[in-house]
Image (cartoon, grey):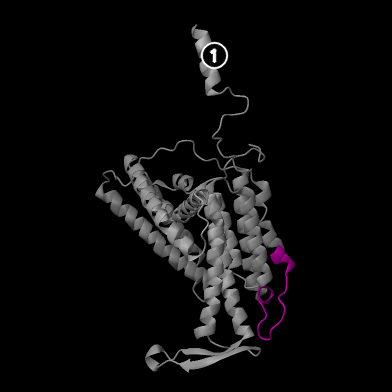
Amino acid sequence: MSPTLPRAVHPAAWWAWAIGMAVAVSTTNNPLLLALALAVVALVVAARRGSSPWARAFRLYLWLGLAIVVVRVVLHVVVGLKVGEVEVVRLPEATLPAWAAGIQVGGTVYLEGLLHAALQGARLAVIIACVGAANALANPKRLLRALPGALHEIGSAVVVSVSVAPQLAESVQRVRRARQLRGDTSRGFRSVQAVALPVLEDTLDRSLLLAAAMDSRGYGRSVAVPRGVRVTTATLTLGGLLASAVGVYGVLDASTPALLGTPTLVLGLVLCAAGLWLGGRHVPRSTYRPDPWLGAEWATVACGALAAGLLVWLSRTTPVALEMPLTPLGSPGLPPLAVAALLVGALPAFVTPPPPPPPSRGPRRGAPSLAARAHEKMVANS
């Protein structure tokens, strides 16, 4: 299939790309690289999001990230550890009693500590933006169909929880649009009070409709599984998770024996896959029109993996290049390889097919109207 033909990209590919971008962002606190990563994520969302309700929720994640930065800075000013040399402001100082761990409230705020707190919040904000990009690009209902059968019930709960924010954003927009049509132009706290109750009512109605629809389609119902199969599945899955945890620790800690590293991690992944396969055999489920996995999906996953791999490699070989110089305070650098890695993450905006257009609610151009078709039918009958 040509990448120029409109179609929906597999949701798992978007999530893999977003996780790769989040891993890449987690390796740096350079404000220039963080701004570039945020611009890359916003570019991909603007170019490839569809017309679904969750596609309009990306702005909420940006506001959430901004709130995190503000809260992080405020906490540093109030109870943070004051370090640095460039003085910004002097605040009244108070030390809490010993039962409160002797936390110091207020004090002199220095520019170095303030920048460190802001950059920590900015890094978390960009990671949240990556998650918001995955929610805006990937259809959670289609993602549920791609999960293994053994994770079907857990996937249903995850999909419902992930789709809360997009549905809430849609409800807020619909209520605000209805208020504007009625001539209500109030702003500020009064508008929040006027919007909150209709949004809550709409959310409850949607929850009841979703519960009824899922119940009518058999969600939450289980089939009889032999006890031996259940025990074997649980043993394989639990053992695989434990082995994977030990393997990840062995890979990250160079002081552990080599046997506890990659071999244990591979063994844990194999056991988890076996447990999921065995558990999925007893979950009857049909899939209507399965989502294809073509070259665009592989390219999307490769872009996220390459961005994450290059940034992780740079963080281990030349970590100073990815850090903001705070002691002494200096201007951040712009490593060419890190910039190239983040720009690779923007390629899905160009190598993936555009999303399908929204369904038309009016008659198509050139189609006869209802009155014309009724007249033709009367003439034919006469």
Q: Is residue 6 above or below residue 20?
A: above
Residue 125 rendering spot, x and y as whole percentages: 56, 67
- Front residue of 375/12: it is 375
Residue 348 rendering spot, x and y as whole percentages: 64, 51
- Front residue of 263/158: it is 158
Q: Is residue 157 left or right of residue 346?
A: left
Q: Is residue 336 magenta?
A: yes
Q: In this orientation, does residue 282 appear?
A: no
Q: In this orientation, does residue 181 appear?
A: yes
User: Dot 1: what SS?
Assistant: helix
Residue 211 rendering spot, x and y as whole percentages: 34, 47
For the stretch drawn in magenta, what is the main secondary structure? loop
Q: Residue furthest front?
A: 183
- Front residue of 343/68: it is 68
Q: Is residue 311 magenta?
A: no
Q: What residue is rendered at 61% in x and 62% in y?
A: 308
Q: Which residues are magenta?
A: 320-339
* Residue underneath mark 1: 376
Q: What residue is rendered at 41% in x and 54% in y?
A: 198
